[in-house]
Amino acid sequence: QNRLKALGDKSLFSPKHVHVIGGGVMGGDIAAWCAMQGFKVTIQDLSQDALGRVVGRAVKGFKRRYRKDKFRIMNAQDNLIPDLHGHGISKADVIIEAIFENLEAKQTIFKDVEAKAKPDAIIATNTSSITLNEIAEVMKQPERLVGLHFFNPVFKMPLLEIIYTPDKTDPKVIELAQSFGAHIGKLPLPVKSSPGFLINRILMPYILEGVTIHQEGVPAAVVDKVAVDYGMPMGPLELADTVGLDICLHVGKILADKVGVTLPNTLDSEVESGRLGKKSGQGFYNWK
Ligand code: NAD
């Protein structure tokens, strides 16, 4: 608790409403987490079906967390509001984009968000690998954009990287983002925008080397068991399936390009054939 306080001062900011754009693996769980912390959360995705899936998954999460406490389950459920047309953007105190990892698509979102958001709202992206500078190129006030980089699974992982661009991101925005991190019970750590930020720069080589060893003929379960026996909480291939192989490929390519990690050549074909890990039901393991 003291560590949380040291990293984010709750008294700086009193957010009440969070708007999340993109209800996939991350956005859905970020929205559910914030709803559980007592925030009103509007969640936006491309179809009613997608929003129905977000709410279904969130309710399962609430029930797992709160077991038989129906009151808390109902409260969290009431806080989570599907919002197909993004009406929440203009009312929210914090707006978090978590759509798929594509620069042009994210830029389109931020042009719209910047035009509609309240002047003092936090405008944030959950991107794992695109620099803030690139996304903010299309914004009139690029100093407003900050990264709120959550980790998967959101319900379990305490760290929240607060991504900023030195000499560009408004220091006040970084402070408010840290304050928000403290409000939602995460550990908000400021990290400069750079390839892989901090954690993925460390974790992705672990995943990629695991995939390479598997590619050389060692069964996935053996690679993972050795890592877990050594003391890692999860083996590299199970972690790859949890993160999503498409995300691993995307971040891996950037790290290969910018810091020289070696990309296993089977990852491309896994993604091309639709084996994306847990979210598609099949990756290095069968999750169906
Ligand atoms: P995902 O593919 O599971 O979900 C993306 C969601 O965005 C989908 O539901 C899609 O329908 C929706 N979407 C796409 N375009 C949209 C639009 N224009 N408006 C509204 N919704 C739209 O992706 P994900 O794994 O949740 O990743 C989302 C972001 O989070 C990416 O930027 C990724 O780099 C980042 N991230 C991922 C992880 C991870 O472990 N998967 C961890 C940290 C950060």
Image: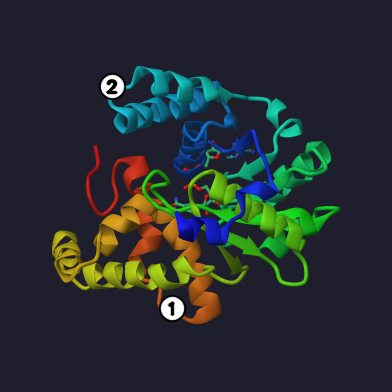
For the point 36% across and 32% down, the residue is 61
Kindly state the secondary structure of the residue where label 1 is placed.
loop
Q: Where residue 261 is drawn, which disc sits there?
A: 1
Residue type at mark 1: give it: Val
Q: Residue 280 versus residue 19: which sits nearer the camera?
A: 19
Q: Earlier in the sequence, mark 2 or mark 1?
A: 2
Residue type at mark 2: give it: Lys
For the point 42% across and 72% down, the residue is 202
* Disc 1 within 8 angstroms of ligand 1 (CB): no
For the point 70% across and 38% down, the residue is 93
Q: Where residue 65 is drawn, which disc sits there?
A: none
Asked whether, in this view, residue 178 is left or right of residue 206, the answer is right
Kindly state the secondary structure of the residue where label 2 is placed.
loop
**Number of labelled discs?**
2
For the residues labelled 2 and 1, the Cα–Cα distance comes to 47 Å
Report if residue 100 is visible in the image: no
Asked whether, in this view, residue 227 is left or right of residue 244, the answer is left
* Disc 2 within 8 angstroms of ligand 1 (CB): no
Q: Residue 159 versus residue 253: which sits nearer the camera?
A: 159
Residue 13 location (% of width, % of height):
68, 45
- Tell me the quadrant of the picture where the N terminus can be found: bottom left
Residue 22 location (% of width, % of height):
57, 38
Give residue 190's quadrant in the image: bottom right
| Mark 1 Cα shell of 10 Å, populated few (<14), some (14-19), many (≥20) | some
Q: Where residue 68 is drawn, which disc sits there?
A: 2
For the point 28% across and 63% down, the residue is 236
